Structure formats: structure tokens, C-alpha cells
Amino acid sequence: MTEVAFHFNVPDKLAYACRLLRKAAGAGARVVVTGEPELLRRLDTELWTFSALEFIPHAHAGSADAQVLAASPVVLADTARGTPHQQVLVNLGGAVPEGFERFERLIELVSQDEDDRQHARARWKHYADRGYAIQRHDYAVREGR
């Protein structure tokens, strides 16, 4: 069964996602990131620019060929269906990601925005109603905010 974790009160989803993806890729994890197309486009740009000394290899499922996707440790995708990796799924979007159950781990990033928090509550309920054990990580508590 997929391990589900929510990271709450993230002040900047894209910066947090970049750090999370850097850590995951550095540990050898294969990650798919889902979200709205505009947010994924912005994440793509951030992954190229967030650190002058590091690069996180990544590809977009909508524009890369199958060989590139399979070789990339990070795949950005509008939907998790049909992506080559099944290890970690990071959701930046508001909806439950279609096909999440085929992944070993799902990480939900939730900002401090009230609308984002409402969507997260609905996703939490969706997973809990289906028997998934959910881990909660509160960025505000961790950072003493």
C-alpha cells in the first residue's frame, strides 16, 4: 500500500519542491511530480536556476521521448498515469493524483494558502477513507514558526 505523507505550511511550494527533489535524486530515488501545467512549467524553470552549483536532471512527460523519461530521475507530468517511475510521487496540485496507488510513496505539498489547505483536507479525507496511513509533517512546527 502506498505510503502517504503531507508536508503542511510550506511557505514556497516550488523552492521546497526543489530541495525535496534534490534530496530524493541525490539518494537515488525516481520521482514523478504532478500538478497543474503552469505550476510544472514554473517548477521546470526553478529546477534549472535554484542552485548555481547543482543540477537536478529532469524531463517533462509531455515533451520528452520514452528513453529520456526512463533515464531521468525526476519526471514532471500533468498526470501520473503512464509515467515510467513508480517509486515516489510528489503532488503539487489540488486534486488527488490519478494513479497514485501504483507508487511506493506519495508526498503531498501544502502551502499556507487557505484554498490550498482546503484542497489538502479533501485529499487527506480521500486517503483516510480508503485506509491509507498518513504521515503529517508540519513545516511551521519544524521551523519554529
Image (cartoon, rainbow, N blue to C red):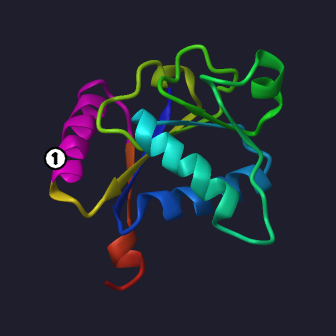
Residue 87 in the figure: left or right of residue 100: right
Give the dominant element type of the magenta stretch: helix, strand or loop: helix
Asked which secondary structure carries label 1, the reply is helix
On screen, 33 above or below 82? below
Q: Relative to 49, is 17 on the left or the right?
A: left
Quadrant including the C terminus:
bottom left
Hey, which residue is sitting farthest top in the picture?
82
Tag 1: amino acid: Gln
- Residue 53 occupies which quadrant of the picture? bottom right
Callout count? 1
Residue 83 shows in the view: yes
Residue 126 coordinates in the image, percent (x, y): 25, 29
- The answer to whether any part of residue 107 appears in the image is no
User: In x, y percent, where is residue 57?
Assistant: 77, 46
Seen at 69% across and 52% down, the residue is 24
Q: Which residue is drawn at 41% across and 65% down?
A: 12
Please give the name of the residue rendered at 70% of the width and 69% of the height, measured from the top-left corner.
51
Q: Position of residue 100 (x, y in %)?
A: 47, 25
| Apparent side of residue 119 relative to residue 109 in the rendered image (left or right) | left
Q: Give the magenta-colored segment's residue range.
A: 115-133
Residue positioned most to the bottom: 144
For the point 50% across and 26% down, the residue is 1
Q: Is residue 55 above or below residue 35?
A: below
Residue indicated by mark 1: 118
Query: What is the x, y in percent for residue 35?
Result: 43, 36
- Is 27 within the magenta? no
Location of residue 71 (image quadrant): top right
Q: Judge by depth and name the residue closer to the eye, 123 or 33.
A: 33
Q: Residue 99, relative to residue 47: is it above or below?
A: above
Categorize mark 1 by other alpha carbons within 10 Å: few (<14), some (14-19), many (20+): few
